[in-house]
Image (tube, rainbow, N blue to C red):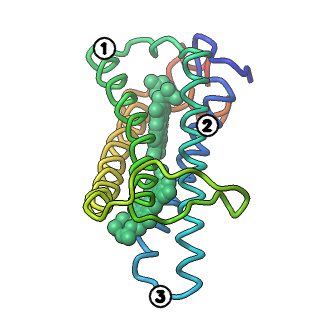
């Protein structure tokens, strides 16, 4: 498997970033939704700290992924994909990238506005990126949640499109975001990449 993105499929680094971030977001969203209902106490503080550290990790991974994407480029469109679908997919990818940054940054601003310190897994401190401000805290608390649900909605549509491509258009769109040989695609031109 090549590291950079060859013309016909996503390379190992782009695939690893993609699926690692998907897994972390699933865990992070679940923890985020459940932790608010925990009883006050040291466990709750520890889970909140964990959520913040994982969130900062996702932010760093999103930045590394974007830089890699700019350096390594992207494969050519899957043969036979209509131009409008190409454009819709690209717009979706831009929106997903924006939300990958906006969700953790809104959390960071929320934490700063609340006046709380921020540590990464207890190893080092991160700076405050907003003034200690009650209204800003309230606003970013809502914003963080709404941006998260926007990410869930777009990611669901994006995943549904990938599965539709695989099952009904029977092309290599999904297979080429997975290691070679994991998914079989029926058309001959796609055997080359899957
Ligand atoms: C991609 C990364 C992240 C995701 C997917 C995420 C997701 C969530 C979700 C789903 C909630 C529950 C929202 C609710 O029901 O009210 C939440 C709450 C929270 N998140 Fe995040 N989060 C991320 C990053 C961060 C970061 C980086 C921080 C801080 C540095 C943070 C701080 C918080 C806090 C403090 C709450 C509790 C808000 C409250 O008091 O209700 N999050 N997050
Ligand atoms: C939170 C979840 C997800 C996010 C944030 C996300 C984000 C992205 C982004 C930004 C790209 C563009 C490629 C890049 O520039 O790196 C992409 C490509 C892709 N994603 Fe996802 N994705 C998610 C979940 C999924 C799931 C669940 C599937 C499959 C069921 C999937 C299938 C694909 C495929 C097949 C491509 C390549 C599309 C192409 O070649 O044009 N993604 N994803």
Q: Distance between the residues labelled 3 and 2?
A: 35 Å
Separation of residues labelled 1 and 3 (CA atoms): 54 Å
Residue 172 placement, left or right of 140: right
Q: Quadrant of residue 138?
A: bottom left
Mark 2 C-beta closer than 8 Å to ligand 2: yes
Q: Position of residue 90 (x, y in %)?
A: 37, 22
| Secondary structure category for the residue under label 3 | loop
Number of the front mark, 1 or 2 = 2
What residue appears at the point 39 percent right and 36 percent down from the top-left corner? 96
Q: Which of marks 1 and 3 is nearer the N terminus?
A: 3
Locate residue 192, reporting x and y percent.
62, 16
Asked whether, in this view, residue 108 is left or right of residue 11, the answer is left
Q: Which residue is identified by label 3?
A: 40
Q: What element carries label 1?
A: loop
Per the image, the residue denoted by label 2 is: 17
- Label 2, secondary structure: give it: helix
């Amino acid at each position: 498997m090549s590291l950079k993105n060859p013309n016909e499929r996503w390379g190992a680094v782009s695939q690893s970033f993609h699926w690692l971030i998907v897994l972390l977001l699933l865990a992070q969203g679940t923890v985020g939704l459940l932790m608010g209902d925990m009883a006050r106490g040291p466990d709750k503080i520890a889970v909140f700290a964990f959520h913040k550290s994982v969130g900062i990790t996702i932010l760093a991974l999103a930045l590394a992924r974007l830089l890699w994407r700019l350096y390594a480029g992207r494969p050519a469109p899957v043969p036979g994909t209509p131009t409008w679908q190409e454009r819709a997919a690209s717009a979706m990818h831009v929106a997903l990238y924006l939300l990958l940054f906006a969700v953790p940054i809104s959390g960071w601003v929320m934490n700063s506005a609340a006046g709380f310190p921020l540590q990464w897994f207890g190893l080092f401190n991160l700076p405050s990126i907003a003034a200690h401000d009650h209204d800003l805290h309230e606003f970013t608390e809502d914003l963080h949640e709404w941006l998260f649900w926007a990410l869930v909605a777009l990611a669901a549509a994006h995943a549904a499109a990938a599965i539709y491509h695989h099952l009904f258009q029977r092309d290599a769109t999904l297979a080429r975001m997975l290691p070679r040989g994991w998914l079989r695609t029926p058309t001959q031109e796609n055997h080359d990449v899957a």
